[in-house]
Amino acid sequence: MSETREGLQFPCDEDQRISTSRTGQQILSEALALIDNKASKEVIKEKNWRKKYPVYFRKMVEDSIRLKENPFKIAKHGLQKAHQLFEFHRQDSKLCLQNFMQAPQIQPLHSITIKGQSSQAPEWYIPYGGKNLQGQALLAQIDAWQEQGIIEASHAEALKAVQAHPEWLDLSDRTMVLFGAGSEAGPLTWLSKWKANIVAIDLPNENVWTRILKTIQDGNATLIAPASTRLNHSDQFISLLGANLLTQTPEIADWLAKMPEQLDLAAIAYLDGEKHVRVAMAMDAIMQYVSSKKPDSTLMFMCTPTDIYAVPTQVMQRARQKLGQRSTLEKMLAKGVSGLSIRHFLRPHTHRAIRSNNGKSYSIADCLVLEQGPNYALAKRIQQWRAIVAKTQGQHVCINIAPSTTTQSVTKNPLLKAAFSGAHLFDVEAFEPETTNAIMAAMWIHDLRNPSSLAQAKNTPEHPLELLMEGANHGGMWNAAYLVRSALPFSAVYGLVKNKFMFKK
């Protein structure tokens, strides 16, 4: 029991049972309590949380739209409740997460610095379709993605700005902290080519650190890695590198807070299942602590497109147009399938505009996928909440929607793998990891370098949720004619058949 309850954990009830659903319901209920008491009570009473959670996440977004003050209230109280509920265990002590820095025997982490061996100047391109796109070819592809509805105009503009400003790529003046540095969808490969000072945090695992060190050595960046033991370069140190976000949370926070440099903190770590919520909470606790000690720190998050978002009304107008442009045969098939499934399959996106007290109207893009589960939705919501709170309080926050990507963590789910393979059936595109890496690394650089970026502390959105709309690469999901989860089974079947017989849409 002591081994399984070490570090950051979900809370137990009076009978020492853990319910991730119950914890998620408590957090969402508290987040909604001050702005929608009826919905708050309904969340707690919900008996079928794993199937019905999208209803409450959507309700939360609707409430967030109506009053521009609501997103901050929801985020603040949701995070407060989460930090009160989650526990940090060490030895015989148990703390609520908000007091994690009071854990006993916090042992200092030590730094080892390794410099890359390349002298190559920073450059950027996008690997796509078997080619490394640069120059006019890159600009043409960006335009094509925008025309196809794969990316929003603000995303296209940001990528073009990076292409037009190669001087932005020299990151020798930045110290960039990667939580989950070895992440398949992370920016490590690109930062290692852009002279960045990279603080890499990942598990003490020789395979992971062998990959990280190889990436650094092939580039022109500088690596700063944590170790529990003081090291020198004559040591066989690979086996000693790393720190565990879940069990060494206070050590990592203390190590970062004592660094003299301004830090750019990137929450990119991912774990499966309930561990995803725990690692999201670990990153959140560290970010909050470091930001309190170093207020000039910047934050970076990558959102998933498979979530529920407030969007500009023109996005839903495009979805309505796509619905109307279907062929007669497709309309008949969709109507028949929807009727036979009691409207569970091929359900159209709703197009209702919601008026905000800022004088503007917004719609909702509901792209949440049930198969990813309520824990995944909660983990990503925690990151959105931190971004909204930090931005409202005047911090620099980079948060962009990254496209669905065929990473190993995704494709090991057979349904999602097949669905992504068949996504073109519904004009949705899933990207290869190397494409997403190049795109999202560039978006981070844009948000750090471009003074007009909404991420900049001095720039205030007209509505807090516009921070999540800006720069979105949703892979076409926002513009899809159907709710993503209602089209997923058909996309999966199409993907399976396509892969077997190698045909295209």
Image: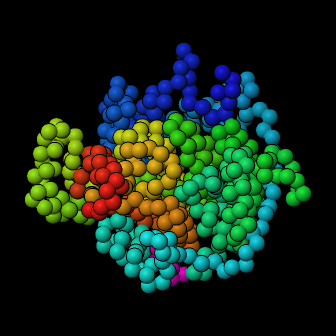
Q: Is residue 8 visible?
A: yes
349 vs 356, nearest the viewer? 349
The image position of residue 260, as x and y in percent, is 76, 60
Q: Is residue 401 visible?
A: no
If the image is split into quadrants, where does the N terminus sit? top right
The image position of residue 117, as x and y in percent, is 76, 72
The image position of residue 274, as x and y in percent, is 52, 35
> Of all residues shown, which one is farthest toward the bottom?
136
What is the chief secondary structure element of the magenta stretch? Answer: helix
> Of all residues shown, which one is farthest toward the front?
501
Q: Is residue 193 above or below residue 413?
A: below
- What residue lies at 16% left-to-right and 37% top-to-bottom? 342
Is 152 on the left or on the right of 138, as rendered?
A: left
Q: Is-magenta flag for residue 13?
A: no
> Of all residues shown, which one is farthest toward the top?
15
Q: Quadrant location of residue 279?
A: top right
The image position of residue 50, as x and y in percent, is 38, 32
- What residue lies at 30% left-to-right and 69% top-to-bottom? 148
What are the residue bounds of the magenta stretch? 159-165
- What residue lies at 63% left-to-right and 54% top-to-bottom? 182
Q: Is-magenta flag for residue 160?
A: yes
State the count of labels.
Answer: 0
Q: Is residue 473 above or below residue 123?
A: above
If the image is split into quadrants, where does the C terminus sit? bottom left
Q: Quadrant location of residue 228?
A: top right
- What residue lies at 55% left-to-right and 47% top-to-bottom? 270
152 vs 311, nearest the viewer? 152
